[in-house]
Amino acid sequence: MKQEEHIIQIRQHDIHQADAAFAEFMKLTEDCFNERSSSTPTLYKNISPSELEVVTVNLLKEVSSSTPFRAEEIKLVAGHSFPDIMAETYYGVEVKSTNKDKWTSTGSSIVESTRDQFVENIYMLFGKLGGNPPQFRCRPYQDCLSNIAVTHSPRYMIDMELKDKSEQSIFEKINVPYNEFCHREDRIDVVRNYYLSQALRRNEMPWWVGKDTTKENKPIPDIRLMNSISAQERNCLKAQMFILFPQVINGNYNQAALWLCTCRYLLCLNLRDLFSAGGQWRSINGKKLETPLPAVLGHLKDVMPLVIKYLSPKSELEFCDFNRPLLNAQNRFETWFNQVKREFESKFGEEKIKLNDLHLDFKDILTNTDKYILRH
C-alpha cells in the first residue's frame, strides 16, 4: 500500500483493501492507548466519557500518520450523532467506556436515528477504566453487541469479549447481518419477535413486548388490576385470550397471564376464575345432561360474539406473536374452532363435547348461542 495514497483513492479500486486498512488503523490505536495506559496507569483512570471522545479523536489523528487515513478527515461529531467520530466519510468510531473492571456495558439505541448517512464501517473503541491499569479494545461494532436491553428504549448491550468467548452477537442470534439490520424500518419488530419467541419457550414474556413500550419517548402505561376494569372490557379480554391461547380451556393459564400483564398492562390475581367460575352445566334447554359440561364452555359461549369479531379479517389481534396458525388461515374461524375442539376433547373427553346423546353439535352451540340455555 503506498503511503501517499489516501483511503478514498484505495476505496475506488478495492473496498476490501480499504476496510483492511481501517482494521489495522484501529489495532494501532488500541495498542497506542494500552501502551500509554500501562506506562502511566492514572492517565485515563478518571476520564469522563466526553473527555475520552476528545482524547480518542486526537490519538486517531496522531496514529493516522502511519496509515492512509488523513488527520484532517478525522472529526469528532459526538453529542447526538452516531457514531462519535468520523474518518474519511465512510468510516466511524463509537467511543464507550465503563468505570468498572469489566468489558461489558450498555450501548447506544438500536434505532440509530442520528446515524450518519454515509458511514459504512464502524468500530467500537471501549475503555475498561476500572482496571489497573485501564485497558482499551477496538472491535468491529457488530462483533461486540451481545443482546438488547430495554429501559426507555431498546439499547444494545456491549460485550467486548464476545468473540473471545465464541459467543454469538445479537445479529447472529436474530439471523440478520448488522449492515442489513441497521437499514431496516422494522428493527424494533425484528428484535421483539426474536425475544418473544425465545421467552415463550420458557413460559416467560419480556415486560417490554407490547409494541408501545419499544417506541422512542413513549411512556409505559400504568399496570392496572383486572378487578378494576368494566365488565365489557373484561369480556373483550376474555374473548381475546380464548383466541390467542386456546389452552386456557385445558386449564393452562401461564401464557395468557403473561400476555395480560405485558401486552394489556393488567394484573389478574385469579385468572383461573375468569374461565372456571360458576360450576358445571347440568342441563341444556331444559334437558338434563348425563355428564355435566365444564364451566369454561359457558364462559366461551357468553363471549362468542366478541370471539367472532376478533377473528375477522380486519382484526389487529396479535396472531403473529401468539397464535400464528390463525394469521394466514383461509378460514380463521374453522382453524380456531378446531384448536378449541382439540383442547376440550383433551381435557374433558371427546364424548362430552360431541353431545351425541342429546343430538347437539358443539359448533352449533358456539355459533348459535341464542338457541341454547345452559343451567347449573
Image (tube, rainbow, N blue to C red):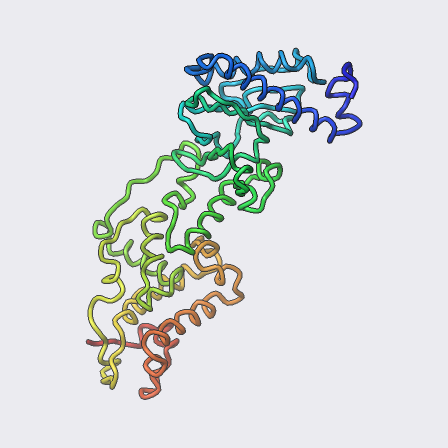
User: Residue at coordinates 77% horizontally, 23% vertically from top-left?
Assistant: 10
**Quarter of the rendering occupied by the N terminus:** top right
**Quarter of the rendering occupied by the C terminus:** bottom left
Give the left or right position of residue 334, taking residue 249 as reference: right
Outermost residue, front side: 39
Give the quadrant of residue 139.
top right
Q: 48 or 304: which is nearer to us?
A: 48
**Residue 150 against residue 278 in the figure, above or below:** above
Give the left or right position of residue 202, taking residue 267 as reference: right
**Residue 7 against residue 200 in the figure, above or below:** above
Which percent across, then down, holds residue 79? 49, 19
Q: Give the tally of numbered discs.
A: 0
**Residue 289 against residue 135 in the figure, above or below:** below
Give the left or right position of residue 140, taking residue 218 as reference: right
Q: 100 or 18: which is nearer to us?
A: 100
Which percent across, then down, holds residue 177? 60, 41
Which percent across, then down, holds residue 116? 59, 25
User: Residue at coordinates 65% horizontally, 12% vertically from top-left?
Assistant: 71
User: Residue at coordinates 59% horizontally, 38% vertically from top-left?
Assistant: 178
User: Residue at coordinates 44% horizontally, 13% vertically from top-left?
Assistant: 42
Give the quadrant of residue 2.
top right
Q: 235 or 116: which is nearer to us?
A: 116
Q: 61 or 210: which is nearer to us?
A: 61
Which percent across, then down, holds residue 156? 48, 35
